[in-house]
């Protein structure tokens, strides 16, 4: 069983640029926003919150560095897939 990282949530690599992360987030946000998606509202809200949470960390350089460090050296408990 693998673990799901914030990079996996957005579908980007750990080497993705800030610009690439922002672009992917905007596409996913449009696709999964609860007001516009074809998913049921509860499912859409869950997916959207996960996407927004990943973006909040990965779009902030300091938080992203801490997150990357925790992935590399431990201390981060990723969600099981």
Image: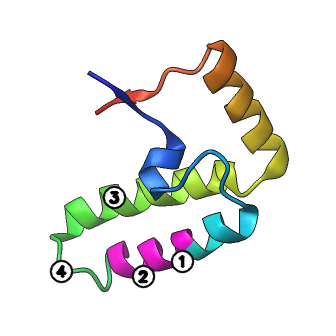
Alpha carbons under labels 2 and 1: distance apart: 6 Å
> Which type of secondary structure does the marked residue at label 4 adopt?
loop
Q: Is residue 70 above or below residue 12?
A: above
Alpha carbons under labels 4 and 2: distance apart: 12 Å
Q: Which mark is residue 30?
A: 2
In the rendered image, residue 19, in percent from the top left (x then y), is placed at 72, 71
Residue at (33%, 58%) from the top-left corner? 47
Residue at (55%, 51%) from the top-left corner? 54
Do tag 4 and tag 2 residues touch (Cβ < 8 Å)?
no
Q: Is residue 35 above or below residue 64?
A: below
Q: Quadrant of the N terminus?
A: top left
Alpha carbons under labels 1 and 3: distance apart: 14 Å
Do tag 2 and tag 1 residues touch (Cβ < 8 Å)?
yes
Left or right of 9, for residue 75: right
Relative depth, front residue between 27 and 39 = 27
The residue beneath circle 1 is 26
Badge nearest the viewer, 1 or 3:
1
Q: What colouring style does the render use? A: rainbow
Q: Earlier in the sequence, mark 1 or mark 3?
A: 1
Does 40 lie within the magenta span? no
The residue beneath circle 3 is 47
What is the quadrant of residue 2 in the picture?
top left
Relative depth, front residue between 5 and 63 = 5
The residues colored magenta run 24-33
Q: Earlier in the sequence, mark 1 or mark 4?
A: 1
Q: Is residue 71 above or below residue 21?
A: above
Q: Which mark is residue 38?
A: 4
Q: Quadrant of the C terminus?
A: top left
What is the quadrant of residue 75 in the picture?
top right
Alpha carbons under labels 3 and 4: distance apart: 12 Å
Alpha carbons under labels 1 and 4: distance apart: 17 Å
């Amino acid at each position: 069983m693998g673990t799901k990282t914030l990079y996996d949530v957005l579908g980007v690599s750990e080497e993705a640029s800030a610009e690439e992360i922002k672009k992917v987030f905007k596409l996913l946000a449009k696709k999964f926003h609860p007001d516009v998606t074809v998913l049921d509202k509860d499912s859409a809200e869950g997916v959207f919150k996960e996407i927004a949470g990943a973006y909040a960390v990965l779009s902030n350089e300091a938080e992203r560095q801490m997150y990357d460090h925790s992935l590399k050296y431990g201390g981060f408990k990723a969600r099981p897939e």
